[in-house]
Image (cartoon, rainbow, N blue to C red):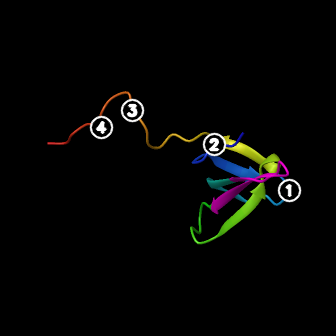
Amino acid sequence: MVKLGGAVKDSITGFVGIAIGRAEYLNGCISCQVQDLKDITKREWIDEQRLTIYSQATAGGPQSRPPAMHP
């Protein structure tokens, strides 16, 4: 399962980007919207089974410690 915010690659076309959306259809098909890493205006809907996970989402959510303050 692809997690939103994670980096993914389409195994067929080689399109690389960040998973920003997910749609599950009545027939069982699951697609993810992937935003290009270099051109944020370029987005593609790709079947989840074609995607390879590069890295999991790390941004946002609780953090182990707050960011350091600079004087």
How far is the residue under mark 1 from the one under mark 4?
40 Å
- Is the residue marked by circle 2 packed among few (<14), some (14-19), or many (20+) residues within 10 Å? some
Residue that badge 4 annotates: 67
Disc 2 marks which amino acid? Lys
Determine whether the residue tagged by mark 3 lies in a helix, strand or loop: loop
> Label 2 belongs to which residue?
3
How would you classify the magenta stretch by its main secondary structure? Answer: strand
Q: Earlier in the sequence, mark 3 or mark 1?
A: 1
Q: CA distance from mark 3 to mark 2?
A: 18 Å
The image shows a total of numbered marks equal to 4
| Earlier-in-chain disc, 1 versus 2 | 2
Which residue lies under the disc numbered 1? Answer: 12
Q: CA distance from mark 4 to mark 2?
A: 25 Å
Which of the two discs, 1 and 4, labels the residue nearer the N terminus?
1
Give the CA distance from mark 4 to mark 3: 9 Å
Separation (CA) of disc 3 from disc 1: 36 Å
Q: Nearer the viewer, mark 4 or mark 3?
A: 3
Q: Are marks 4 and 3 in contact (CB under 8 Å)?
A: yes
Which mark's residue is nearer the viewer, 1 or 2?
2
Which numbered marker is on residue 63? 3
